Amino acid sequence: MHRIVFSTAAALAVMLGTTGAAFAWERGPGASDQNLRYSRAYVEKAVDMLSHDQEDYGGHRVAAMNDVNAARADLTAALRYDQNREDAALPAVGSLDVASSDWERNQHHSNANIIYTRRYVERAIDMLGRDRHDYDGYRVKAIGELRAARQQLLEAIRYR
């Protein structure tokens, strides 16, 4: 009985491993480029949301903006490094829950904006972390800058 279970588990593991490799191969560089464009679109949304906020949060919002802008520059450099014509157009990224342009930025809305912006940064980090292409080191550098921005946004949340 144990041999049957072990054999079945081994066969299942081999099957899942080859299926996963096939899906990874199918993604190819085109899917990676699209992932990079979507990540950059999330970063653009974060830049937009932070730039319309007036509260400084003890300097943490400005520090996060600097980190996000550095990541945006690195993602742009990564797209240029790849030299794909499609990379010039960024996909549209909708709002997670509400449009930032609809808000009057009182303190409550300003606090909520920091939380929403952190979600965009998290989404970009997650997408970039799953990508297997290096783009001459720009992808990894952008991840580091986005992690720094995420920490600054967390500090901004704690500040209030």
Image (tube, rainbow, N blue to C red):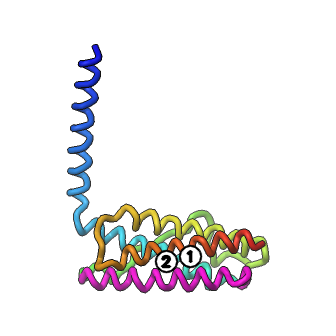
In the picture, measured across the screen, residue 97 lies left or right of residue 125, that is right
Can you identify the residue that label 1 sits on? 149
Q: CA distance from mark 1 to mark 2?
A: 6 Å
- The residue lying at 23 percent from left, 25 percent from top is 7
**Which residue is most to the front?**
2
- The location of residue 122, given as percent across then percent down, is 52, 65
Along the viewing direction, whichever of 40 and 145 lies nearer the viewer: 145
Image quarter where the N terminus lies is top left
> Within the magenta stretch, is there residue 58?
yes
Compared to 95, does 48 lie above or below? below
Compared to 21, does 53 lie above or below? below
- The residue lying at 63 percent from left, 78 percent from top is 101
Q: In the picture, residue 158 is in which quadrant?
A: bottom right
Amino acid found under the numbered disc labelled 1: Ala
Residue 58 visible in the snapshot: yes
SS assignment at label 2: helix
Amino acid found under the numbered disc labelled 2: Glu
Image quarter where the C terminus lies is bottom right
Dot 2 alpha-carbon crowd within 10 angstroms: few under 14, some 14 to 19, many 20 or more: many
Q: In the picture, residue 112 is in which quadrant?
A: bottom right
- The residue lying at 46 percent from left, 69 percent from top is 124
> Within the magenta stretch, is there residue 137?
no
Residue 92 visible in the snapshot: no
Along the viewing direction, whichever of 152 and 115 lies nearer the viewer: 152
Can you identify the residue that label 2 sits on? 145
- The location of residue 89, given as percent across then percent down, is 35, 81
Image: magenta residue range: 54-83
Compared to 69, does 14 lie above or below? above
Q: Are marks 1 and 2 in contact (CB under 8 Å)?
A: yes
Q: Main secondary structure of the magenta part?
A: helix
- The location of residue 4, given as percent across then percent down, is 24, 19
- The location of residue 153, given as percent across then percent down, is 63, 73
